[in-house]
Amino acid sequence: MMLHAMRIDGGAASGPPRISYSLDGLRRTSRSVTARIDEMLTRLHEAGRKSVAIVDTACGQGQLLLHAARKARALGFVAIEAKGFDPSPENIEAAWRTAMATRDPAIGYSFMAVNDAAALPLEDHDADLAIGDHDVPDLHRIAIDDDAIILSGARPDRA
């Protein structure tokens, strides 16, 4: 099985990452990663999907997961399940705070501190969109297909 994914970490093949600041000004993220998230969600929406499950296996303080959930809502998804995992309880707490500050009844957030990526409580093909670091081995198992995987590399919002 061939993995079709985009790794954004400033490697020689992709050139330096393009950096932008989120609207709240607290964290940075690669514009290329968010553009890929937007593209995947747009494709799902154009295919007639009304609900979406998004998983971020190394969510840090939740910036990419929150972006994905909000983008899905803006596109018109009416049921959004957004699950974030990170080894740092402090990052998980920060992600919860940000998510609760912008509550939307169409978005169901869950965040969990998990030290072992192999222990993520996810079923096979649980995610329509799977976001993760390049070192998480099980992304292809949890995504609906390999095209639904976005590799983010190291993230500046991870403590």
Image (spheres, helix red, strand yellow):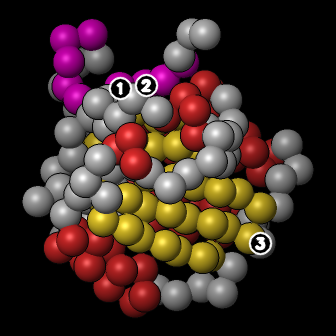
Q: Which residue is mark 2?
A: 6
Could you give the CA–CA distance between mark 2 and mark 3, rounded to whole angstroms?
27 Å
Q: Nearer the viewer, residue 18 or 94?
A: 94
Q: Which residue is mark 3?
A: 78
Q: In percent of the image, x 29 and y 47: which residue is there? A: 116
Q: Nearer the viewer, residue 36 or 94?
A: 94
Residue 22 sits above or below residue 94 on the image: above
In the current view of this chain or complex, which residue is farthest to the right?
Answer: 48
Could you say where residue 51 lies in the image, as x and y percent from the top left? 77, 61
Q: Which residues are magenta?
A: 4-13
Q: What amino acid is at disc 2?
A: Met
Q: In percent of the image, x 44 and y 51: which residue is there? A: 120
Q: Quadrant of residue 74?
A: bottom right
Left or right: where 15 falls relative to 39: left
Q: Judging from the image, what secondary structure is the residue with disc 3 in?
A: loop
Residue 15 at least partly seen: yes
Q: Which residue is mark 1?
A: 7
Left or right: where 75 falls relative to 115: right
Q: In percent of the image, x 20 and y 25: which residue is there? A: 10
Q: What amino acid is at disc 3?
A: Val
Could you say where residue 13 lies in the image, as x and y percent from the top left? 27, 10
Left or right: where 79 falls relative to 114: right
Could you give the CA–CA distance between mark 1 and mark 2, rounded to whole angstroms?
4 Å
Q: Is residue 10 magenta?
A: yes
Q: Nearer the viewer, residue 31 or 4?
A: 4
Q: Judging from the image, what secondary structure is the residue with disc 1 in?
A: loop
Q: Quadrant of residue 159?
A: bottom left
Tag 2–tag 3 contact (CB < 8 Å): no
Residue 65 sits above or below residue 90 on the image: above
Residue 80 sits above or below residue 134 on the image: below
Residue 24 at least partly seen: no
